[in-house]
Image (cartoon, rainbow, N blue to C red):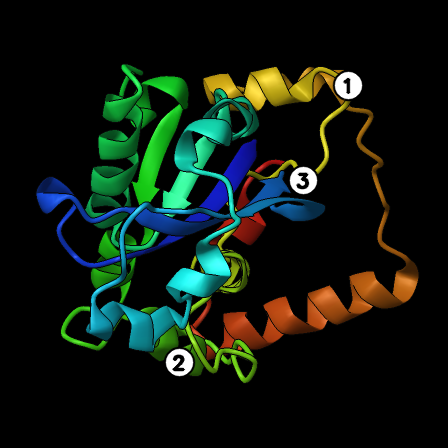
Amino acid sequence: MRQIFLDTETTGLAAAQGDRIVEIGLVEMVNRRLTGRTLHHYVNPGRSSHPDALRVHGLGDDFLADKPPFERIADELIAFVAEAEIVIHNADFDLGFLDAELARLGRRRFASHVARVVDSLLLAREIYPGKGNSLDALCRRLEVDNSARERHGALLDAGLLAEVYLRMTRGQGSLVIDAAEGGDAAHAEGTVDLATFDLPVLAADDGERAAHEAVLTHLDKASGGKTVWRTLDV
């Protein structure tokens, strides 16, 4: 599975009122392993950031003046995320800004270019109900090192989110870890033909058989002779 972890920084909180994206960061993961591929851009929003937003990300007008506008990175962004599962913390916020930027260019909404969008904030609320589930709170709870996060930064936060997501979803959904070539399609459909795997059969040695027999004898004694499976035909 190809997943992209995405984060943005913006001039303010209200995309509908003209606030714009000033930074976007994306980190790629394939089959729960970071690939090292990233996409990162600072973006000239054509307007100043609200003072509260500026305190969060620190990206002032002078720094952003020579950066590309969103229209110059749009194609690269869409190509990078194409058909991937996108993981965003508080997805409605980032999607609102992405959709607004794309609408200015006459482009389709962001979600139409990807396989699906997962909101990691909603996932965290299901796993940790009633607790703080900001990215910082999750880093503390899951022991993810965020000591470099003096200010919010889109690429840094996307990387932290990837690590948080891995730790939140560490349960294994399949008995098969590495399928043969072509196995990804089978996983995507939710079925794996185990007949295609050459599974080794390891026979117990004399010591292991003796230890097993001792455990059964103990269970038989403790249950008053009710270990009935010992009487079944094998």
Between 11 and 207, which is closer to the camera in this rendering?
A: 11
- Residue wearing tag 3: 177
Mark 1 falls on what kind of element? loop
* Disc 2/disc 3 C-alpha distance (Å): 27 Å
- Residue wearing tag 1: 181
Q: Residue at x 56, y 31 (%)?
A: 1
Instruction: Select label 1 or label 2 by which is in front.
Output: 2
Q: Categorize mark 2 by other alpha carbons within 10 Å: few (<14), some (14-19), many (20+).
A: few
Mark 3 falls on what kind of element? loop
- Residue 92's x, y, as percent? 20, 44
Instruction: Select label 1 or label 3 by which is in front.
Output: 1
Question: Does residue 74 appear in the picture of this structure?
Answer: yes
Q: Categorize mark 1 by other alpha carbons within 10 Å: few (<14), some (14-19), many (20+).
A: few
Between 50 and 66, which is closer to the camera in this rendering?
A: 66
Q: How many marks?
A: 3
- Residue wearing tag 2: 141
- Residue 196's x, y, as percent? 74, 16
Q: Residue at x 25, y 41 (%)?
A: 97
